[in-house]
Image (tube, grey):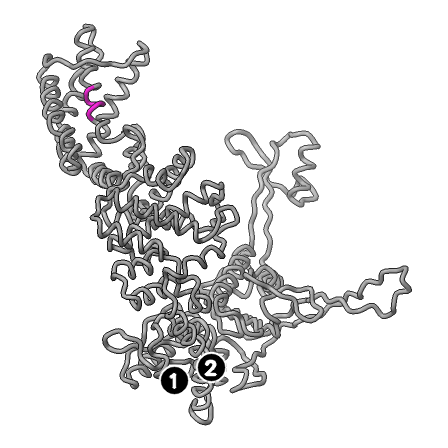
Amino acid sequence: MAELLIELFMEEIPARMQVRAADDFRRLVTDKLTAAGITFDRAEAHSTPRRVALVVDGVPAAQADVRDERKGPRVGSPEQALAGFLKSAGLSSIDQAEQRDTGKGVFYFAVIEKKGGATIDALPGIIDAAIRELPWPKSMRWGANDFMWVRPLHSILALFDGAVIPGALTLATAETAPEQSDGTVCLAGEVKAVTIPYGDKTQGHRFLSPGEFTVTGFADYKDKLLKAHVVLDREFRKRLILTGAEKAAVAEGFVLKDDPGLLEEVVGLVEWPVVLTGAIDDKFMDVPAEVLTTSMRTHQRYFALETADGRLAPRFVVVANRNTIDGGVAVVAGNERVLRARLSDAKFFWDQDLKVKLEDRLPGLKDITFHAKLGTLHARVERIEALSVSIAKALNWDTTVVEQTALAARLSKSDLTTGVVGEFPEVQGIMGRYVAYHEGLPAPVAEAIADHYKPLGPSDRVPTDKVSVAVALAEKIDTLVQFFGIEELPTGSRDPFGLRRAALGVIRLILENNLRVDLAAIFKAAGAADTTVGELVFFFYGRLEVALREQGIRADVIRAVRENNGRVTDLTLLIDKVRALSSFLASPDGGNLLGTYRRGINLLFKEEGKEDRIVTGMPERRGEPVEIEFYDALGTANSTIPTLISNERFEEAMVALAALRGPVDQFANNVMVNAPEADVRENRLRLYAALRALFSEIADFSKIEG
């Protein structure tokens, strides 16, 4: 068995593209090996800022032999059929085919055996195709090349069993025509071929170890890269950065602020990580911590440090891509100088923004268009304020909460006109909270200004304070109602206005705060037309099914509850019923009772269909002992289950329903419903009709699958 090693060496790859590119290249190469009948034991992909590498172990030196059997026509078939068979099988004479008795006659069979070729002969085409098919989010051309790639590609290392794979990547290029046109003829460029040959050489760190070196295999490649100041293994680079940053923080008397997203980005920026610590000038420390960390993280890729109690420390960690003679002194000084310039802007905006009250910024929202068809941001704020007050009142919250809700909603977007948010859009809402506290506004108002955007995703925190919840609901519902109203709906692949995320945010706000609200009524309060209300309710059911499926709850159980006695738009009530029913169906009593119930209801439907009627009327307490037991059990259930349901004690209602299992099973197994006596048959059908009516108190069980 041999080893296949490939490296694509190029200019710096954007950090966000590296891991996906390595995975895609591994997938493309291994899929093509498999398609060519070439087996392997293991494939491992690597990436650094300047290279994508792949090693495939356990590759055979030769492709496997192929034996293919093809069944032909019956012996004695016409010449035309035989000729077609010979052509498709690649045979020159019917004598080359075997005759076999299949039990249904004697047929010709062609046995085609193809000797496996040398693996190395198939590799050039596989590598070339994988390179050309490698998808990049963004590509470019360089020089006169027509070849599209993420960054200029310099070399391709390709070794099989230590030997260079013969081949090259051909790049078409068009050069300027050798003579000038006289104005009557358009002269095309002369197309030439430029190639990047496969080889056994690569390069190390751009500055610390410039120049090429030869490798003989993956172990040699990885070892020589490390000597040339390149840490190939991404996870090892990540550990070096994280461990170094944590130690640097401790050395300064602080702790490293957890930031896995930034770590993933920084590991894609360096091949030889060197962790250094810099200082933040004290004069900037009165600027909100979120503004400082955003500037450091987004613009400079610095890690923030914190004190033991979670406050921002006046230090940062920067990861350089090289060692320096002075131990990083000049690098740190340069980064501190750049950071001072960044933070000077932030402090200037912060100081200026504090001079203007949030209320006084409201007229400025009239100059900001929310959407061409939906007016200005000022009009949106007015809608959110009115809707948030309606929500607070619908939830019967006290007057103070309603007043604070109105104020928070009115000021919720004011910070969008601040200089800080203009420079750092990531802190919108957060900036408003700081200004609100500076003005002495109540804490619920200040927190709601920051929290009304939440939750931003499935892992984001859900607000719990009443004022924050009301404004957050209003903000998201206004978005949904307005965009549905102008028919800007999400499609299978596009959701430019984040409507799915907004709907899931509304669902989480309602369920995690156990709110009892009528969604349809809120949509109407937000100005939705009746048709839009229906579309939104249907849209929410779809999002709810997605959210509950992730919790292991079946979509058919959700539909069975929501479509029973009209569409339920109180999500908390709906979910309580769904969870109780889901637990019931998962229990032995529930599952078996459902099966028995279906047997009886199917019989009932069949008889109703014959006579074109619906069985009605109360059954009588008479007949065989199991029949009377069924009647008594129904009576007990009917006296308890509707009351339990009306009191929203759904789990107790399911326990009472499960108690029917024994009597219903005994009746189904021992009584012939279609008795010859008409009155006996009718009474037994009425028993099943009463059972159907009882089940319908809970859900539409016809929607439940399986």
Question: Which residue type does callout 2 highlight?
Answer: Val
In the displayed structure, 399 sits above or below 151; it is above
Q: Quadrant of the C terminus?
A: top left
Q: Residue at x 58, y 34 (%)?
A: 107
**Circle 2 or circle 1, nearest the eye:** 2
Question: Which residue type does callout 1 highlight?
Answer: Gly
Q: How many marks?
A: 2
Give 125 or 145, whichever is nearer the viewer: 145
Whichever of labels 2 and 1 marks the residue nearer the N terminus, that label is: 1
In the displayed structure, 423 sits above or below 69; it is below
Mark 2 residue element: helix
Q: Is residue 411 left or right of residue 209?
A: left
The secondary structure that dominates the magenta segment is: helix
Residue 680 image point, x, y percent: 17, 9
Image-quadrant location for residue 332: bottom left
Q: Residue at x 27, y 34 (%)?
A: 561
Q: Which residue position is annotated with label 2?
A: 338
Residue 161 image point, x, y percent: 54, 72
Residue 278 is labelled as 1
Q: Is residue 635 left or right of residue 217?
A: left
The boundaries of the magenta stretch are 690-694
Image-quadrant location for residue 326: bottom left
Q: Is residue 102 left or right of residue 233?
A: right
Residue 660 colored in magenta in the image: no
Q: Residues within 10 Å of mark 2 (few under 14, many from 20)?
A: few
Q: Residue at x 57, y 81 (%)?
A: 214
Residue 363 is labelled as none
Is residue 57 visible to us here?
no
Image-quadrant location for residue 100: top right
Mark 1 residue element: strand
Residue 693 colored in magenta in the image: yes
Report the Cα–Cα distance between label 2 and label 1. Answer: 11 Å
